[in-house]
Amino acid sequence: MSGESLVPLPQGAGYGVVVGVGLAFGIGMVGVNKFLEKFLLEKSDHTEMFMVANRSVGTGLTASAVISSWMWATAIIWTAAQGYLYGIAAPFWYAAGVSIQIALMTVLAIHAKVKVPNGHTVLEIVRLRYGTPAHVIYIFLCFVTNLLSVTSMILGAAGVITALTGMHIVASTFLLPLGVVVYTVSGGLKATFLTDYVHTLIVMVILCFLTVKTFTNPAITDLSSFYDILVAADKTRNIEGNYQGSILSFKSKSSIIFGLVHSFGDFALVIMDTSFWQKGFAADTAATMPGYMLGGISYFAVPWAVGTTAGLAAIGLENTPIFPTYPRKMTTSEINAGYVLPYTVMAIAGKGGAFSLLLVVFMCVTSTTSAELIAVSSIFSFDVYRTYINPKAHDKQVIRVSHWSVIAFGIFASAFATALHYGGIDLNWMGYFLATIICPGMFPLAFTILWKQQSAAAATIAPILGLASGIAVWLGTAYAYAGELTVMSTEAQLPCLWGALTSTFSSAIYSVIITYIKPQNFDWRVFLLLNEVKDSYSEDSSSTGPEATNPIADTQDLDSVQHPYPPEELNRMKRAGIIASVFSVIVGLVTWVVWPLPLYRDYIFTKSFFSGWTVVSEIWLFFCLLVASVYPIVDGRDVLLKAARLAWQSITAKGEGQYQPEERKGAHDQSSSSGVDDERNEKVPAGVEDKSKNIDVVSVS
């Protein structure tokens, strides 16, 4: 192809998707929320709905949301680039690095649901246990995590949109979050679940099409010819650290390093990104474990299949006339900016494929950004405004601050991404750098939920020391290896690996040592003092004093505190926690030991093994499509039928005032997967026995 054809789509296509489709989703979400409010009485202007979707999201929608939460634009873009750089092993290690984190988050989500049933953000939990100093530290750490997450997504997506359409990168950077801000402000967390579903459906359908297209096009007609093209390309290419320098060998030093750095970063993202905790709080108690487990297993296929097909196809097609850069090879800056995937799609599917990828990138970045916006808004509304500025804030005041926080953060993140772009920072640098910065708080924050002896001093000091240690090692090793500190030297694999390892494990060591000096014996029942936010204008909120709005109830005697869930429900959730723990161990062993280690030897994939490897990844990808798009409909069929029936009654009602929406008896009416009675959501005041349900005082262990 000539240089003129590097940009296959007109700028109008870019603006049409980024602005037009984005605003269409925003307007559509406003309509959906009006529908939910009218027929299902789900009001997004109430904090419990805006922040945690009334804790009523079912298994199907939870699984879809987990998949969409990891459906980062950077995931599909970066895995293709790493597959191009290091061969067939890199996409697998990307997938393995994600699945184990989702499995572990299943355990944390269940523990959080049991121990903090009325939680909104993980930062509330930190403040309740450790006090203000630790709370401020984790506000900073979690905000930085959210900011860097959104920034990396915007950087990667804006670069690809520019490559596909020629749209100015600053324009795409600022316009990408526009539609997300609109529907997030209008709908809250439930809006992100619903739009996540639509986004993920579109993304999965297109990804299934594009990955199959990589070996069913005029240049690569089937898997046999795909392998032959790769073998031919292998003769002119040598990957340092791979067995015989081959792209078809799983024995790849660089792929292992990439997998480790990526895994540490994703571990921290799951724990330090407050959006994952919010989706755990939002899930129905019966949906948390199966939803997270199913989503984690399904998502494994996305980076594996996309990286294997698109990344390797780029290697095979780069020397053919259909590749956009032919006759030259891609430059380092193009690879690091994430252009491997768009160039490959242009080669195999032309303008139609380019437009499909444009939609995929847009859907991915908006889907994940929406959850990040809600997470940041919860930090500023709950953990800053309602804690330090206006402790007596009522529901509508908290929502107002949340809305303004969403808007402000959307603008700030775009400006920050633009500054990084002009500073020479690209997707590859952000991907490797991220772990060093966000890992220090990972273990101390997890210990907050799992280890009752961690002291406030340990939780506060350990992340700071870990961050300082990680940055020092990262910069020190970068200088030692390269003799200078530049963008290129600081994104090198080994310095980033040493920095990530130091940040992660030094903070854990610091926490254990400081705790050992003066351990805490925390009573988990303290977490039950956290209350839901009440609407001062609602009929069931008779009190307007501080006790009605303070997140911590004024209770001195913990023996009088009752858990809002009945004993049988708590026992069921504890069993689910054990199952989730076993599941996490199995996922870790399979994806990091049983499956990959036998392949890490002096071996080059044969044609039959390569064909089987690729076919399995494709079958798994189609399974992910079913889980993300079909299962939520099947699981939520009762709610959908109810909504359709009520809408039909409204349309066919004769005369004004004939239609009256059904009153909801509990928040769980909207979840078809919940096997627990609605009555469990009716909170029992501390110290008052509920005679109707005969709930005994239950301690949380």
Image (cartoon, rainbow, N blue to C red):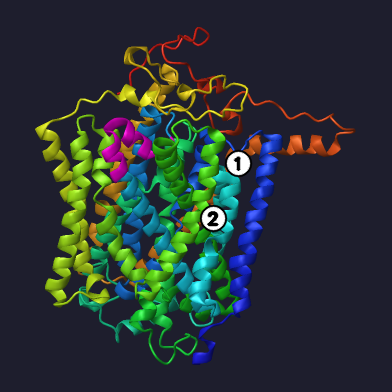
Q: Quadrant of residue 355?
A: bottom right
Above or below, 134 relative to 563: below
Q: Secondary structure at mark 2?
A: helix
Q: Amino acid at mark 1?
A: Val
Q: Earlier in the sequence, mark 2 or mark 1?
A: 2
Determine crowd level at label 2: few under 14, some 14-19, many 20+ residues with C-alpha closer than 10 A: many
Task: From the image, tell me which residue sits under label 2.
Answer: 200
- How many residues crowd mark 1 within 10 Å: few (<14), some (14–19), many (20+)? few
Q: Choose top left, top right, bottom left or bottom right for residue 237.
A: bottom left
Q: Position of residue 201 (x, y in %)?
A: 57, 55
How far apart are the two marked residues, 2 and 1, measured between alpha carbons? 16 Å
Q: Position of residue 261 (x, y in %)?
A: 26, 60
- Image check: 378 left or right of 186? left
Most distant residue in the right direction: 655
> How many numbered dots are placed on residues in this image?
2
Is residue 254 placed above or below 36 in the rendered structure? below
Answer with left or right where residue 661 lies relative to residue 697. Answer: right
> Residue 554's x, y, as percent?
39, 19
Q: Residue at x 43, y 83 (%)?
A: 317
Pointer 2 and pointer 1: residues touching (CB < 8 Å)? no
Image location of residue 163, percent across then percent down: 49, 78
* Front residue (pair 388, 155): 388
Q: Which residue is mark 1?
A: 634
Asked whether 18 falls inside the magenta stretch, the response is no
| Type of amino acid at the residue the image marks with label 2 | Thr
Is 304 left, or right, of 166 in this rendering?
Answer: left
Using the image, tell me which numbered label, if any, was put on residue 376. none
Which stretch appears magenta?
120-137
Magenta stretch, main secondary structure, is helix
Residue extending furthest toward the top: 691
- Left or right: residue 445 versus residue 621 is left
